[in-house]
Structures are given as structure tokens and as C-alpha cells.
Image (spheres, rainbow, N blue to C red):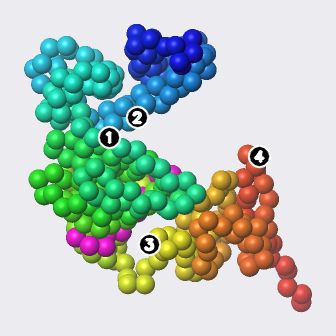
Amino acid sequence: MTQDTLSEAEYDAITDAAAHWCMRLHAADCTDEERRAFEQWHAEHPLHAFEYEAMLEIWDVAEHLPRPESAVVTAIKPAPRKWQQYAVAAGVCALAVPLAAVIGWNMGWVPNSYQRFEATDSVRHVTLSDGSQLELNLNTAVTFSNYKDERRVTLKHGEAFFEVSHDASHPFIVRAGEGKIRVTGTRFNVWMYEDQVRVNLIEGSVLVSSNAALPGDGLRLGPSMQARYRHGDYMPQINQTYPNDNALAWRSGKLVLDNLALNEALPLINRYLSKPLQLADSTTGAIRVGGIYNIKELNNLVSSLPKVLPVYLTRNKEGNPVINSMPVQPSKS
């Protein structure tokens, strides 16, 4: 089978297979034998990998869909934990059948616009289909879905600055980690590394929740305020920022470390590194570091740390650099 000779039926079969494998690999009862069969299927043809990646994007959108409750859908009576599989199937149908797309849009289940953007080694400016502007930092990926009753961005990893097109009747939701940020029109920055999220508001107002599954829209931020949360937080931590705050220095290609302890600085540094720095212990984490660095050259910072701080570098078994504090020399009596 070659890509040039595939019939329409063969293309449809690949799409169906991709949907099947997407659902099976996300199922709790997926077996090792099935995973090996998937790997074999995935490698058989370039279109298999392409269609499977497309199906993962649909799964990502379906992840945040509400559980279907209409009479039409409940008549199917899917098992409670199977609802996402039906959402994926509905997504596939919506791609193939215009009527399904219209019904899905009117019910608020299927977006009429879906976009994916990624920035790797340079800052990238993008425009969403609703007119909102995003600036993406290095190593950042976002998706945008436009639903009937809301606009939704998922920050998959990295950092983005938002200038949201105002539409009070069509709120703009940003998903980051376990939380969400709800706005109608404003300017703000969202930074995420592993399970840590920080939201800095520049203009307007936003509501920040540390757990999107909790009731309510969260805590309100005003200009020059920051919210922080991480996995397991019931509520975000709120604090005031100042005019000289360096959170947005990345937009000028800089990372500013203002006399931070290493345990605070490493999450800011590591998101730019291919091999993240580790701390040997809490004593090392308390050592403070400062300076202004080019975000494209932060790998050079790793080798220079022993020149500016009382530390030395080792490697752990994964090959990642580990920062160790220099042993204290006993004083001579």
C-alpha cells in the first residue's frame, strides 16, 4: 500500500483504525499485546502515524467536553467512564459528516474552529480565529477550540502572552495544568512548568481557579496581580506585582533572575533546557543567583554556574546535571 494509490475507502479505513487505537490505548484495560499490535500498525505506513496524531488532537479537545446529558445522547446509555470514547467518535463523525458537525456545534460539543500552534527555538506571534493575539515563548504549545458558548485555549506546555478579543457573551477560557483562567477581554501572561502555573495580569480582569473540576470560577485578579497554583492546590495563591516585575522579560528575549534562591530559579531556567538541572539537596537550593540571560543561550548558563557560585556539577543516572554546593572548609584555629 502506497500513499499515491490509496482509495477513498482505504483512507476511511485508516481513519477508523486510528480512532480505534486512540480509544484502546486510553482504555484502562488495554493489554500489552494490543500495544504491540498498535506499534506495528503505526509503523506500517506514514499515514497511520499522521491519522493517529490527528486523532490525539480530537481526544485532547474531547477531554474537556461536558458529559453528554441530552435525551438524544443518553438514549445510547454509554457507561459513565466511556463518555470520552463517544466524544472522540462524535469528533470523527463531525469531521466526516457536515450534519453531525452542525448538530455538535449547536449542542456545544464540537468546535467550529480548531487550531494548534507551537514555538520551538524562537518566540512566535499567532492570531486565533476569533482575532485574539498570542505570543508564544520558546518550547511552547497551545491549542484553540471555538465552541458555541466559549472560546478555549489549552496551554499544553510553556508560556504565552494573551491579548484577548473582547466578547462578553463568548468567554475565553485558558486551561493550564489542573486549573483554568476565565476572561472576556484582557491582556495577561500564563507560565507553566511541570505542575506549576503562574498567571500575571497586565490589563482588565480574569478569574483564576486552581482546579477546573471545582465549582465556581475562582479568584478575581486585577491589574498588576499574580496568581500561582500547582497540582493539588485547592485555591491559587494571590500576590501583588510591581512595575519592575521581570515576568515578561522573555518577550524581549531575556530571563531575569533577581537574587533568587536556586530552588526558585530552576523552574524558570529548566523550561529552556534540554536536560533540566537538579539540586543535590536543600542547602544547594538555598544558594542565591542573579543576572540577565538570553533565553536562547541558557544552556551556556549550566557550565558557567561553578564560575559564579560556590557549586560544582555532577550527573545523575539519567545524565541530567546536578548542582552541588561546595563543602564548607573547616576554619583554622
Q: Quadrant of the N terminus?
A: top right
Residue identified by numbered label 2: 57
- Nearer to the camera, 75 or 259: 75
Work out whether residue 264 can be spotted. Answer: yes
Q: Are marks 2 and 1 in contact (CB under 8 Å)?
A: yes
The quarter holding residue 165 reads bottom left
Q: Earlier in the sequence, mark 2 or mark 3?
A: 2
Q: Is residue 198 magenta?
A: yes
Residue identified by numbered label 4: 317
Q: What is the distance, in whole Å, between disc 2 and disc 4 at their CAs?
A: 34 Å
Residue identified by numbered label 3: 248
Amino acid tagged 3: Leu
Q: Is disc 4 surrounded by few (<14), some (14 to 19) or many (20+) residues within 10 Å?
A: few
Q: Which mark is residue 73?
A: none
Q: Earlier in the sequence, mark 1 or mark 4?
A: 1
- Magenta-colored span: 193-204
- The answer to whether 205 appears left or right of 273 in the picture is left
Q: Is residue 94 magenta?
A: no
Rendered position, 182 above or below 178: below
